[in-house]
Amino acid sequence: MAKEIAVFEEWPFVVPNIEKACKKTSEITKLLKEAKTGPDALAAYKKMVKLSNALQDDFTHCSVLFTLDTTNEQYAKANDYIDENSPYLSAASLEFTKAMLESPHRAYLESKLGTFIFTMYEYQMKSFDECIIEESAEENKLVSQYMATQASFRFEFRGNTYNMTQMGKFLSDNDRETRKAAAAVYYGTLDTHVDELEEIYSKLVAVRTKMAKKMGYDSYTELGYIRMTRFDYTPEMVKGYRDQIAEFVTPIATKLAKEQAKLLGVKSLKVYDLGSHFANGNPVPTGTTEDKVNNAKKMYKQLSPETDYYFNFMVDHHLLFLDAKPGKQSGGYMTYFPVHETPIIFSNFNGTSGDIDVLTHEFGHSFQGFMGPKSIPEYHMPTMESCECHSMSMEFFAEPYMDLFFENPDKYKYVHLADSISFLPYGVTVDEFQHWVYANPNATPKERDAKWHELEEKYTPYKVKAYKGCKYMEEGHRWLTQNHIFASPFYYIDYTLAQVVAFEFFNLDRKNHELAWKKYIKLCKMGGKFPFTTLIKNCGMKSPFDEGVLKKTIRPLVKVLKGYHPENF
């Protein structure tokens, strides 16, 4: 059962006093250092958990409110304050982490908390130092600047003004002339912001490289992997995985693109065709946002008692922020409030099938947030690639209920699966691009754009052909609107790894739903007690890094796609 809380609007808006928080953190660190017994040391740890949870709740609340309305001066001011001062709290917290690692009562603490938490602490020590406080504040500021800049984009189309997400419905319209006109406005507008975004990114690369150098790393890549807490795989393993995608998945995605052109009735895809799959239109969910939420209630009631309870809890406590609005940050996310013991879902509905993807994907994150262990916060949620397994797998567990949202559910299932397969080459494009950027931190914007274009030729050549005539895309600017590249460096390969695991769950679910769901629940409940590959194997699935897993997982999906008979939609 979830903790009883007030509805979101009634939560008090509190901007934490970071100076006082630093002082309190230091006081608890002193208690830990002076602990005479193991139980005394554990008591100090629990005090820190209580303080950290309270601070995290308030920090997260401020962040969510800002993303809901980036034009609100009060929220923007709070966000700026946190960006500028949170590195000081990180420094104070690091002293506590160090004291935990050096505690003479470590054996006792390990007996109560487990050993993996200390591995996490070792990575924390490697990821931050007081010497980079100034650079960390600058990094935070630049990321917020990027987010606010993107949220400010306005697209004037056929007499109305839209944000980036809202333009999506026109870019996938079943009328090709509408798509063409929308694309001209969309990419034309983005082209006017290229220099602005390139400058922000140049500054981010410079400051991150400076941070890494000051901490003794050869490049930001090494620090970036540590910050992403990649305990059990390396850049070399990731490269081998990317090579498998290029060798095996890119040819499949190329065939799917040809099939897409055929289904659209065009000789070759143009940039404004990439978001459309059928001449008679993409699958479009029926009803209003309220209808979609009500149908999601029905879906999760049928799926399991746990999903039924948790989704209704979120609805009843107003924890779903779904519709696109002016000033609202683009994209979608789930974030967790440790004191309230609940997640929220943030998205930007635009009337496309992506609305349903959000209701399943982000709820997968939220469901794990509810199910994960709570007594030890470090184990509550795992690293990013493991978290994405929860969300992407939930998308496929939800597929049997798509008749609640679509008049032709198989049409949606076809598009969802085809897009999921084709996503893999794009995902590794983002990853290899970031590895190149931080290996070449002095590259000019033009050199970065050229590298992006080169990688698109390698992984998604069918898209490059479609870009002809679109200046923005031909010049290699597609990456500028990929939030993760700016805000969460090296956080993107995670999606592709999780996608392969989700495909494993999908294949198993079609054979044995009860077994697949049992393994999924086990994965959610384990939270972050283990690193990625161990978590996956402990719930009975296979690591995407293991030889042959990628091919074995993808091959059955090609047959599933053919079985939908898309030519009849």
Image (cartoon, helix red, strand yellow):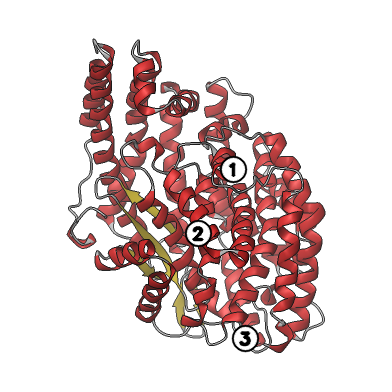
Query: At x 50% / y 62%, what residue is drawn?
Result: 394
Of the image marks 2 and 1, the number of the one nearer the N terminus: 2
Residue 517, disc: 2
Q: How far apart are marks 3 and 2 (CA)?
A: 33 Å
**Residue that numbered label 3 is attached to:** 281
Please state which amino acid type lies under the numbered disc 3.
Gly
**Image side of residue 156 versus residue 88, left or right:** right
Q: In this view, does 133 lie above or below 296?
A: above
Location of mark 1 (residue): 537
Left or right for 375, reference 117: left
Contact (Cβ within 8 Å) of mark 2 with mark 1: no
Question: For the residue marked with disc 2, what is the amino acid?
Answer: Trp
Give the mark nearer the N terminus: 1 vs 3: 3
Alpha-carbon distance for marks 1 and 3? 41 Å
* Residue 267 locus on image (x, y percent): 82, 82
Residue 397 image position (x, y, % from top left): 52, 65
Say which residue appears at 67% left-offset and 40% top-offset. Answer: 435
Count residues near mark 2 (Cα–Cα under 10 Å), then give few for <14, some for 14-19, many for 20+: some
